[in-house]
Image: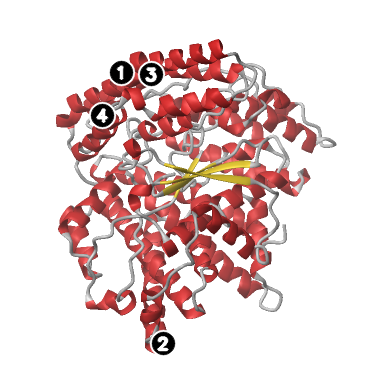
Amino acid sequence: MRHCHSHFFHKIRFSLFLALFLIGFGIFCAAVCQCADSDTWIAQFFHESPTAIQAGEQNSNSAAGQSTSNDVNTDFENYIAELFRQEASASLLNLHYTLENPQAYQITEYQTSLGNYSAASPALAAASAENVLSALHQFDAQNLTTLNRQTLEILTDSMNLTVAGGNFKYYDEPLTPTTGLQSQIPILLAEYTFQSKQDVSDYLELLTDLPRYFAQICDYEREKAAADRFMPSYTAQTIIDQCRDFVSNPEEHYLVTTFNQKISALSGISKNERRSYQKQNLSILKKQVFPAFTQLADTLSELEDSTINEAGLCHFPEGREYYEYLVRCATGSSDSVASLEKRTTDQRKEDLLLISQLLEQNPDLTTELENCAVAPQSPEEMLTTLRQAISAEFPEVPECNVTVKYVDAAMEDYLSPAFYLTSPLDHLTENSIYINQKNGYEGLRLFTTLAHEGFPGHLFQNVYFHSICDLPIRSLLGYPGYTEGWATFVELHSYTYAGLSEDAASLCAANQAAILSLYATADMGIHYEGWTLDDTATFFGTYGFTDEETIRDIFELIVGEPANYLKYYIGYLEFHDLQADMKKQNPDTYTDSDFYKKVLDIGPAPFGVLREYVLGDQ
């Protein structure tokens, strides 16, 4: 599972208006990553997409039907445990990144494949979700414990989203510039851990399944093209370039070097076995994996001329409705797109006003920011600093290790500035954060990025929640609005840990929030209101963004990753507003520490559920 940090371009010019708060200050722009950060989340695995949790086709009703009023909690927990086992074992990548020891969860059989992908997938997932909903309706929520009741509500919401997704044939897109499978799978393979010979055998078998899986995706893209739903030609070209770059250096490929490193570190195998595994890996990569990526690139090249829409989703027949569905999935908010547009605009005005007031009251802030320099630290040292800094405000998290790694040069152009890979539920102590050195992040920018990815962002939230929640099904219910919203919310708060004055930290946070809001508005404008490239340029020009190449890049990335920005910004706004409402509700007793603990204890959820349990008497 990846959580991604947002970044964008650094060549933006500002009008005099924006210069009020950005004189001499490097702008922190946002880049698309449905992810890393996970969060971030790149497509959050395969099972965490909106069509997730394809479980319960055969057993959903029987498990619930055995429930009695005296033992409803036990029956509910048994049901969701079986649901978890079915879903987690449906794909080897799902299983490997979810559990280190599946046997401890009574999972002894699993599919050594990447799963399946076809035009029928959303409808099949919807049918499975309806079965799950039928089972869930048989549990009396009032007789459940608080945790079980929360889980029932969250699972019901997730299944309802999956059912809604079944209505949009050929709208789902597995290949997107930053969060697509072609960029996810290589990282998940590189990070695939070896604890035993069985892990190695499973991994090699997984590699051999890639041609079949990619062939299904190629067939799906051909069908999309025939249905006049193919991606924009410039998006296709970006993915083609990714695939060709991926196979450009086979002998020194990172899937060769990382495999060899992991095999060398694996105990209990002989030198001959080690050499044999290494030869098998290289052979499979050359004969099956690399050709599969090449075939994917060739297929997209053949289909490029079939593009009929080079702009937002609303230009397709059911595009606006599909975008509304994506917004619900991405944000976890039940508000209409029109409401989100207004809320985004209103908050941007507030942030810009705050910036103007801060600079008017303290003109020396620009000088402070020009001279601001975080003490020279390595990423590891920054993470240690952050962990120590948050200890007074945030709940205690179990001891855990984090390894900082660097994106391979072959993937630097296509991956986020940083992302976090979650640890298995039964092994929360080991975590990885990747840094993309191509972006040149350092100092304050790197510090806040690591706050987003590490402490108190994705790593902290993930380890904390799964250390207190003993229901593994929750790990499969991805709510990127919560996870990316939380990481963005605490990233903006992290300026207070960077040695800045209170006003300077507030200025930086408002600045970053205002910039993210621009991309959120553009996302909704392009995909819901039908903005053209010229419309987008006019909008950004109002705020001083005038570089034509940059505007085109922004437009094309937003077109290629619909609703992606919203999980960051709308998710952040939901936490911002929820915090304000909790303060109003409890003016005499409110503390930030209480707020953080409440939302962290509930964990990833739609914001309606989060509000119910944070503000209600639950």
| Residue at the spot 23% in from the left edge and 64% down from the top edge | 539
Q: Amino acid at mark 4?
A: Arg
Judged from the image, the secondary structure of the residue bearing numbered disc 1 is: helix
| Mark 2 residue type | Asn
Looking at the picture, which amino acid does disc 3 mark? Leu
From the top left corner, tell me how far across and down residue 461 is, in percent. Answer: 60, 51
Of marks 3 and 2, which one's residue comes earlier in the chain? 3
Q: CA distance from mark 4 to mark 1?
A: 10 Å
Earlier sequence position, callout 1 versus callout 3: 3
Q: Is the residue marked by circle 1 packed among few (<14), some (14-19), or many (20+) residues within 10 Å?
A: some
Mark 3 / mark 4, whichever is N-terminal: 4
Among the two numbered marks 4 and 1 on one chain, the one whose residue lies closer to the N terminus: 4
Give how far apart the Cα atoms at labels 1 and 2 are. 60 Å
Question: Which residue does the numbered mark 4 point to in the structure image?
Answer: 244
Mark 3 element type: helix
In this view, 2 is above or below 457:
above
Q: Pointer 2: what residue? A: 362
The answer to whether residue 59 is left or right of residue 483 is right
Q: Quadrant of residue 239?
A: top left
Residue, x 65% and y 37% (percent of image)?
425
Mark 1: amino acid: Pro
Residue ID for mark 3: 285
Task: Work out which residue is located at the far bottom of the displayed protein and give it.
Answer: 361
Q: Are marks 3 and 4 in contact (CB under 8 Å)?
A: no
Q: Residue at x 26, y 39 (%)?
A: 317
Q: Residue at x 22, y 54 (%)?
A: 531
Q: Nearer the viewer, residue 206 or 337?
A: 206
Mark 1 — residue? Answer: 291
Disc 4 residue crowd, few under 14, some 14–19, many 20+, Cα 10 Å:
some
Q: Which mark is residue 122?
A: none
Separation of marks 3 and 2 at Cα, in angstroms: 59 Å
